[in-house]
Image (spheres, rainbow, N blue to C red):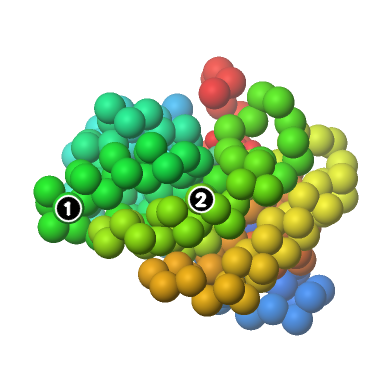
Amino acid sequence: MDERINEIAQNIKIVRDNIEKACSRCGRDPKEVTLIAVSKTKPVEDVRAAMAAGMEYFGENKVQELTMKMDTITEPLHWNMIGHLQKNKVKYIVGRAELIHSVDSLDLAQKIQSEAAKKNAVANILLEVNVSGEESKFGIRPEQLEDLVRQIAVLPNVHIKGLMTVAPFTEDPEENRQYFRNLRNLAVDIKSKNIDNVTMSVLSMGMTGDYMVAIEEGATMVRVGTGIFGERNYVC
Ligand SMILES: *Cc1c(COP(=O)(O)O)cnc(C)c1O
């Protein structure tokens, strides 16, 4: 067990060092980049090990696993829902997850609005954009972004904080640079329109294979699973 705790602590140190290096390459302050430990499929003990190493931001991609971990760990943590969200599960996380990264339809945003209103809460969200155009990916097409932002902006209990993308899996992270750059450009464009109730301060992009490139392209949140907790037993 101690060995596992050490392993996770060491991995976190490596990732943090890499974040610093990427920031210094492009003149950014590492404080601008939030590291989210993606603990999906990993046991609560692993989350505790990461907490012991100073991690405060965690990401999960399934509602049931997210709520189980939130219920089990009572210490205050920043929980992020990063996976595809079904409307019938929205009620379990609104008011609990700090940020929902994966909103990709008006329908879903409206459901979040009604649950948030019931709880007198504000739901912070990101819009997931499929910048690579991969068929298998969730997320809206870039051309749909502005309309969707304007439609969601009028929902009083939903705050758009920025954009998120999942880039293609690749051996060469440089191949994803264009997609990260595209996401940042979309955020700059939306920001310039000064839409009420919309900020574009968060760019959630970059995973284990490509987070350094994502940081060079402006990521403010990177979502790292394998790089912290090791390989997962199954693909999800
Ligand atoms: C699993 C997952 C990650 C982390 O992936 P790694 O390659 O293990 O770092 C990041 N973002 C999303 C949306 C995920 O589902």
Looking at the image, do the residues carrying marks 1 and 2 touch, with CB atoms under 8 Å apart?
no
Q: Quadrant for residue 60, please give it.
A: top left
Answer whether residue 63 is visible to the viewer in this image. Answer: yes
Please state which amino acid type lies under the numbered disc 1.
Ala
Residue at the spot of label 1: 117
Which residue is located at x 42 percent, y 42 percent? 106
Q: Residue 58, percent across and down?
A: 42, 49
Residue at the spot of label 2: 148
Q: Nearer the viewer, residue 92 or 213?
A: 92
Looking at the rendering, in which quadrant would you find the C terminus? top right
Which residue is located at x 28 percent, y 27 percent? 88
Q: Residue 7, percent across and down?
A: 55, 44
In the picture, measured across the screen, residue 159 lies left or right of residue 228, that is left
Q: Quadrant for residue 26, please give it.
A: bottom right
Q: Nearer the viewer, residue 179 or 76?
A: 179
Which residue is located at x 12 percent, y 48 percent? 118
User: Disc 1 on helix, strand or loop?
Assistant: helix
Please state which amino acid type lies under the numbered disc 2.
Leu
Q: Residue 158, percent across and down?
A: 32, 57
Q: Residues within 10 Å of mark 1 (few under 14, many from 20)?
A: some
Q: Relative to 128, say whether 180 is above or below.
A: below
Q: Nearer the viewer, residue 133 or 226?
A: 133
In the picture, measured across the screen, residue 191 lies left or right of residue 176, that is left
Q: CA distance from mark 1 to mark 2?
A: 20 Å
User: Disc 2 on helix, strand or loop?
Assistant: helix
Q: Residues within 10 Å of mark 2 (few under 14, many from 20)?
A: some
Q: Residue 20, percent across and down?
A: 68, 70
Q: Earlier in the sequence, mark 1 or mark 2?
A: 1
